[in-house]
Amino acid sequence: MDVSATNSTAAATAKAAGTVASKLNADAFLTLFMTQLKNQDPTKPMDSTEYVGQLASLSQVEQATKTNQKLDSLLSASFLDQAEAIIGRTVTSADGAVSGTVQSVRITSDGALARLTDGREMLLASGIVVS
């Protein structure tokens, strides 16, 4: 039995589900909800408890979105503080190939990039040594 194929399929499915879930936001929820209200059968209107439940769900989605934005902001501030703390200190790459004193740190989409006093740059990733 080929277990690796099953594991690969499960991982791909989980990744796809995560991607879809991350694209659904409060705007998509509100659009779907409003469409449902507009297209309901006038002779059989939506149950009021169902309506209240969906509004509560919308509120939860909005609160979760705001919480995530605030957490992202806190993480960014923490990342900048950590990056600032290594300016003037010596860093060595995990393989020991690059070493030098940090002159400045630039935040990129890949992470923090340290510019050393000799002009070289080094990605601040796991395994580096700061002294």
Image (spheres, rainbow, N blue to C red):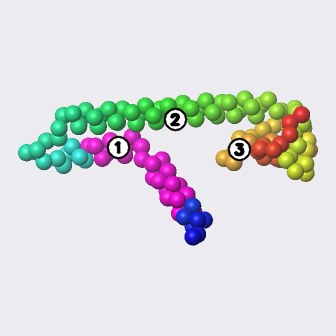
Provide the residue designation for mark 1: 29
Q: Can you say which quadrant of the picture contains the N terminus?
A: bottom right
**The C terminus is located in which quarter?**
top right
Q: Which residue is drawn at 61% across and 30% down?
A: 74
Q: How far apart are marks 3 and 1 (CA)?
A: 32 Å
Q: Which of marks 3 and 1 is nearer the N terminus?
A: 1
Residue at image mark 2: 68
SS of the residue at dot 2? Answer: helix
The three-letter amino acid code for the residue at tag 2 is Asn
Q: Residues within 10 Å of mark 3 (few under 14, many from 20)?
A: few
Q: Which of marks 1 and 2 is nearer the N terminus?
A: 1
Against 67, is 46 above or below? Answer: below
Q: Is the magenta stretch mostly helix, strand or loop?
A: helix
> Residue 99 at what x, y percent from top left?
91, 44
Instruction: Name the residue tied to disc 3.
Output: 111
- Residue sitting nearer the eye, 129 or 98: 129
Q: What's the amino acid at mark 1?
A: Phe
What segment carries the magenta color? 8-34
Indicate the quadrant where residue 51 lies.
top left
Query: Relative to 110, does residue 79 appear above or below in the rendering?
Result: above
Query: How far across and down, in percent of the image, does residue 9 sit?
Result: 53, 63
* Callout 1 secondary element: helix
Position of residue 18 in the picture relative to residue 32 (left or right): right
Residue lying at 43% horizontally and 31% vertically, measured from the top left: 63
- The answer to which quarter of the image holds residue 100 is top right
Reading the chain from its start, which is encountered first: label 3 or label 2? 2
